[in-house]
Amino acid sequence: MTATDQELRQTPLHAEHVAAGGRLVPFAGFAMPVQYPTGIVKEHQAVREAAGLFDVSHMGEFEVRGAQALDLVQRLLTNDASRLAVGQAQYTVLCRPDGTALDDCILYRLEDRYMVVVNAGNLAKDRAWFEDAAKDFDVEFTDRSDELGLLALQGPKAQEILEGLTDADLDGIRFYHFARGEVAGREAIISRTGYTGEDGFELYVAAGDAAHVWRALLEAGEPVGLIPAGLGARDSLRLEVGYILYGNDLDESRTPLEAGLGWAVKLDKGDFVGRDALAAQKEAGLRQRLAGFVMREKAFPRHGYEIRVGGEPAGEVTSGVLSPTTGKGVGLAYLPADAARPGTGIEIMIRDRAVPAEVVRPPFYTEGSLRR
Amino acid sequence: MADLPPNLMYTEEHEYLSPTEEEDVFTVGITDYAQGELGDIVFVELPAAGETFEAGASFGTVEAVKAVSDLYMPVTGEVVESNNALADDPSLVNSDPYGAGWMIRIRVKSTSDVEGLLSPEDYADHVG
């Protein structure tokens, strides 16, 4: 065992993954299952056609309470938190003063507090950022990441599976809304959110309850095709529907506007960190933007492959996959704004060969069960 | 434990060489161990019949969901046939690497080159 292995953290579901034969790989400091013996393609198909169960307990959860809780999240995050009703969630971005992105997050409004869900790989810097900013506000900031497990039940059969295990009114939970309820007898936040383009739920439970809920879901879902699914399928599923991945498609060198996340940046909500820079960038016009592309012949575009426009290097693939559902190579890349228009012909350099592709507007797969 | 047929020869890059009825023609594919490490294979690029490659040269690629790997020629020779079935169903490499998931058939330049490859025991040590 290497030193790296010893330093890897384990989620509350680690023993479940080992028992299921999961192939554990280092991811954001955690040992995470990239796949189970079923394989990434079958796990991907299960989520599209029935349901898959993901452990995403590595994600971080912050709580912000107090008289100025709204003021703090409004100050740090780009979306307009004042529009959230209790029981509602929103996608949002954490920016630096220059408008570049520290992370992309989900903000939940609970009765008495906000919960910010952050990427595991950014947890330490996000926490420092929040803690520093919180000093100027009448708030109580708490990192709950180690106390919570997070399970994502995704797929057209998700509701059918969950219904038998909960007293919550699932029909009453619309997309990007949540309710509190019991799942398999354990308290949970039941959120109709996900990262797959399918209907589904993300279940926040106490870390000590995670394994019980995981096993109960797998048992209840097995007759309708539920299987555990790993990070590999999670990545191909999210990319097929054009969801960005922080670290690939967004990082500290890019702004949310360049990443096509302008819909989550509310410049008119009042001042917030990054607002002036983002307003100026919008005013000046974007020089580059994140574009989707589809290969014109069968090929697998991968992260880091060079892109050429008019024969000249113009960027590189930030995420790519040979779509398990459509059979086509698809991906995302930052391109000069005029090349980022749908219909533009580009080339991806795949092992010294320029393979033709076309800029398209994501999603690359539109038949998912997700209903907004 | 990965399947390791005793009648084949192997390379350190995880290709196998399997004899055919013709003395100087061999079937080439990747080992059961290799397909297991790669995971789900979704695309295989193979050369056309008639192309020749030196020992150690890349004759194609295999794309798994998480990674791409080069395929290396075990010995110098000429491609006499490619497995066209892999274009429609690359997962045959996962499900039957020594059978329906074969990749190319080659006519070797010198049959004595084959003797320099790894025995099943040596290959087992290599991946062990």
Image (cartoon, coloured by chain):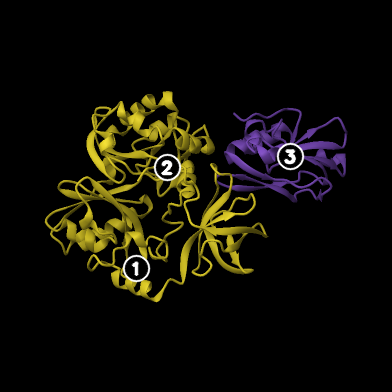
Chain colours: A yellow, B purple
Task: Check the residue under mark 2 and report the chain it is in.
Answer: A
What x and y, as percent, mark residue A217? Answer: 35, 29
What secondary structure is found at the residue carrying circle 3? loop
Q: Residues within 10 Å of mark 1 (few under 14, many from 20)?
A: many
Mark 2 and mark 3 residues within 8 Å of each other at the beta carbon: no
The mark found on residue B84 in the picture is 3
Quadrant of residue A274 in the image? bottom left
Q: Amino acid at mark 3?
A: Asn
Secondary structure category for the residue under label 1: loop
Provide the chain ID for the residue under circle 3. B
- Residue A3 at least partly seen: no
Residue A165 x %, y %:
29, 27
Q: Which residue is mark 1?
A: A99
Q: Residues within 10 Å of mark 3 (few under 14, many from 20)?
A: some
In this picture, residue B107 sits left or right of residue A194? right
**Residue in view at x 38 percent, y 60 percent:** A261
Quick check: do tags 3 and 1 share a chain?
Answer: no
From the viewer's perspective, is the residue at label 2 or at label 3 nearer? Answer: 3
Image coords of residue A369 (percent x, y) = 41, 39
Q: Is residue B3 above or below residue B35?
A: above
Q: Which mark is residue A31?
A: 2
Task: Estimate the spatial distance between the alpha carbons at disc 2 and disc 3, rounded to whole Å.
Answer: 38 Å
